[in-house]
Image (spheres, rainbow, N blue to C red):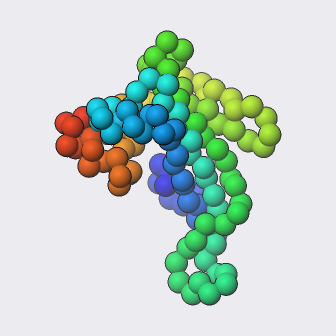
Amino acid sequence: MNYSEGNPMPDGHMFDNVFVDPAAWAGFQKTGHWPDKTVFVKEDRGAGSKGSINKNGDYQTEELMGLEFHVRDEARFKGGWGFFFASGDKPADLIPYDAACYSCHLAHGAVDTTFTQFYPTAKPIAVEDGTFHE
């Protein structure tokens, strides 16, 4: 996924893997909302196109390009969510609240400021529970 026009990596692509903790997933399945203390981890990986038997399309490589965290904590974060970016072995840094990611998630997140519209296992639950917003 890329949120900007054009291709910032003209010679390559990237895959995003999004993980959520099991307790938050169970809560979402029951209510269609992400409960307080939910933690999403977005792993950005490089993509390869020529390797082994692959003749067409892209596949994930071992190259870890970054980690992002989307943390719901109503008491701790303005608006209930905090975004973090991790690089290397340093602790993840809180992304400042004036960064575009906060307003974009607020404007375009389908459920609780998350891009649930891109999660094929979560979207039908939110639609059925009436928590999904186009």
* Residue 52 figure quarter: bottom right
Q: List x then y, in percent, for residue 63.
A: 71, 60
Q: Nearer the viewer, residue 30 or 133?
A: 30
* Residue at point 49%, 12% (across, down): 75
Q: Is residue 101 visible?
A: no
Residue closest to the far right: 89
In the image, residue 16 sits, relative to residue 25, either above or below, namely below
What quarter of the picture does the C terminus occupy? top left
Does residue 50 sit above or below 44 in this rendering?
Answer: below
Give the quadrant of residue 58: bottom right
Q: Residue at x 30, y 48 (%)?
A: 123
Numbered marks: total: 0
Q: Quadrant of residue 33?
A: top left
Report the residue at 64% width, 72% height from top.
48
Percent coordinates x, y for residue 102 in the rendering: 47, 30
Of 24 and 126, which appears nearest the observer? 24
Q: Is residue 104 above or below residue 5?
A: above
Closest to the observer: 109 or 124?
124
Whether residue 108 sits left or right of residue 94 in the image: it is left
In terms of depth relative to the viewer, which is nearer, 131 or 47? 131
Whole-percent x, y for residue 130 in the image: 19, 36
| Residue displayed at 60% across by 40% down | 68
Q: Position of residue 7 (x, y in %)?
A: 54, 60
Name the outermost residue toward the top: 75
Residue 36 appears in the figure: yes
